[in-house]
Amino acid sequence: MGSFDLLTHYQHLDRLPCPAGSLPDDDNHTDSMAVAQANQTANAPISLSNRAANAIRKIMQTKDLPEGYGLRVGVRGGGCSGMSYVLGFDRERDEDQTYRIEGIPLYIDKRHGLYLMGTTVDYHDGLNARGFTFENPNATETCGCGSSFAA
């Protein structure tokens, strides 16, 4: 299975599966896992709004992603303003930095962190806007559709 692009595909469902073997054995393990997860989240160059995290978990469940797949956030050249956002599911690569935000594995190419630092991924499901959006404090210019930027 190749990567899955969230900017063009998304679905609505209700719960996130718990992978086999992911439950802690005792309270100490739970505490250390919580601290480790908090550190990973604190160090991540991006954040996910609650709406985005919920939508991503729902998609992960409905698409029945293979083991080892996580959310990939990045940038690529192109788009109205010079760079476009990448948002999809993929396997971890050698050049990735790996994080875990709200239980979601997150992969970001090390070269993209500078462009994404401080970015918040949000999700809208209304009449005027539907889908994932990016609030990037590094963007000096954005296009009308919100999927490309200049930094």
Image (cartoon, rainbow, N blue to C red):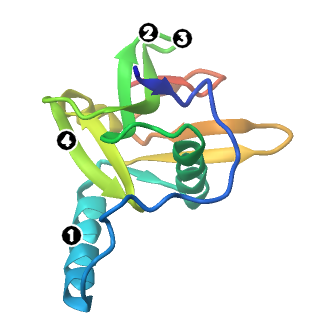
Task: Name the one closer to the observer, 98 or 141.
Answer: 98
Q: Which residue is located at x 83 percent, y 37 percent?
A: 128
Residue 120, above or below 22: above
Precedes in sequence: disc 4 or disc 3: 3
Precedes in sequence: disc 3 or disc 1: 1
* Residue type (three-letter) at the residue carrying disc 4: Gln
Q: CA distance from mark 4 to mark 3?
A: 28 Å
Label 4 residue SS: strand
Q: Which residue is mark 3?
A: 80
* Residue type (three-letter) at the residue carrying disc 3: Cys
What numbered label is drawn on residue 78? 2
Q: Which residue is mark 4?
A: 97
List x then y, in percent, for residue 24: 28, 77
Residue 93 horizontal side relative to residue 146, left or right: left
Q: Which residue is located at x 57 percent, y 50 percent?
A: 52
List x then y, in percent, for residue 57: 53, 52
